[in-house]
Image (tube, rainbow, N blue to C red):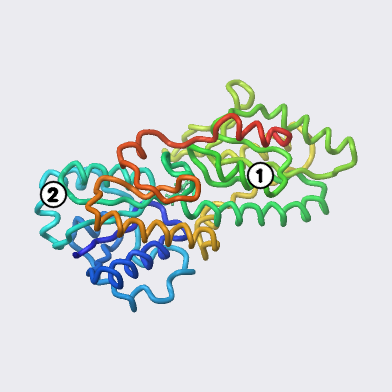
Amino acid sequence: MRIGILTAGGDCPGLNAVIRSVVHRAVTNYGDEVIGFEDGYAGLLDGRYRPLDLNAVSGILARGGTILGSSRLERARFRAACVNAKELIDKSGFDALIPIGGEGTLTAAKMLHEAGVPVVGVPKTIDNDISSTDRTFGFDTAVGVATEAMDRLKTTAESHQRVMVVEVMGRHAGWIALESGMAGGAHGICLPERPFDPADLVAMVEERFARGKKFAVICVAEGAHPADGTMDYGKGAIDQFGHERFQGIGTALAYELEKRLGKEAKPVILGHVQRGGTPTAYDRVLATRFGWHAVEAVHRGEYGRMTALRGTDIEMVPLAEAVTELKRVPKDRMDEAESVF
Ligand code: F6P
């Protein structure tokens, strides 16, 4: 068989581990040929690819990013290409396609499948917000980075009697904030799933200072927002050049707390540092398992599905099921962390 593989959307530690695993399983076990499309779906549409043999994937297991490159989907061009799926397949002559990506990539994979392209998806995102899989690789790495940042921020915060507001990724779901906040011992956690009241955070900081703890760390997901009417934070404000002036919730919240508390509060935006660098052992193993199972599914002809972690097993689930809605932090998980909310 000739199997095509591509990585699309935002990158994520563990992508190379999937690519390596697919190539090893397909080439060594089945004698397949594997081709890697460059820069996500753009490479598929352009017919831009390179052969991937065992040497091409040697030494990439621990490397962050993706050796194939990635890009965001050009929706109009993609839709147009789906209309003639046969032409798309013939351009590169593949028998099956393994797209690795987040919600957008998997939705596109579902569209390709419906258009007649034999597709097996592999989910990825540091946000861990894809339904139907208990975990995505990249999440463990991101949580580790954010946790270490909080450990480090505590010592400097304490030395200067400051409040640190750490903004982590998670636009629609607060998994990184929840788990890194818990692991890093944050004194407050703000998630997109539960609007926060800055007055509660002020009360928490004041209570800590009153009992002699002269610092606080608050972990806020980038998609978190205050409850209506509790804080004027400038979201949506447009400057004279037409640019959104909003600097992010971490910055807005630090400014607000400083104003209300009369104490120094510093924003720390972790940003893409959470997505870069080497994957943890957990993420390498999960990514490798996903790659292995994707090749098996291709050889069973089980198309229109994606690999998913269910408990400790890898299962194949319909792409349609995986992209219906994002997996958000449920109330009981928030309740477990409640002492720090
Ligand atoms: O979807 C993963 C994610 O890391 C989000 O948490 C974040 O909002 C987004 O990607 C940032 O993506 P970009 O690379 O386009 O800035």
Q: State left or right for residue 327 relative to residue 263.
A: left
Find residue 51 and report its image quarter.
bottom left
Residue 54, above or below 90? below
Q: Of residues 25 and 337, which is closer to you in this image? A: 25
**Quadrant of the rendering where the C terminus is positioned:** top right
Residue 107, above or below 45? above
| x and y percentages locating residue 115 in the rendered image | 16, 43
Find residue 225 and report its image quarter.
top right
Residue with the most extreme top position: 229
Type of the residue with mark 1 = Gly
Badge 2 local density, few (<14 within 10 Å), some, or many (20+)?
some
> Which residue corresponds to mark 2?
85
Q: Tag 1's secondary structure? A: helix
Badge 1 local density, few (<14 within 10 Å), some, or many (20+)?
many
Question: From mark 2 to mark 1, how far is it between C-alphas?
Answer: 45 Å
| x and y percentages locating residue 180 in the rendered image | 63, 48
The total number of labels drawn is 2
| x and y percentages locating residue 194 in the rendered image | 58, 29
Q: Of residues 170 and 332, which is closer to you in this image? A: 332
Q: Residue at x 64, y 23 (%)?
A: 230
Q: Residue at x 14, y 54 (%)?
A: 88
Mark 2 touching mark 1, by CB under 8 A? no
Q: Of residues 41 and 333, which is closer to you in this image? A: 333
Q: Tag 2's secondary structure? A: helix
Type of the residue with mark 2 = Ala
> Which residue corresponds to mark 1?
181
| x and y percentages locating residue 190 in the rendered image | 62, 36
The answer as to whether callout 1 falls within 8 Å of ligand 1 is no
Q: Residue at x 24, y 61 (%)?
A: 4
Q: State left or right for residue 162 relative to residue 311.
A: right
Residue with the most extreme bottom position: 55
Q: Earlier in the sequence, mark 2 or mark 1?
A: 2
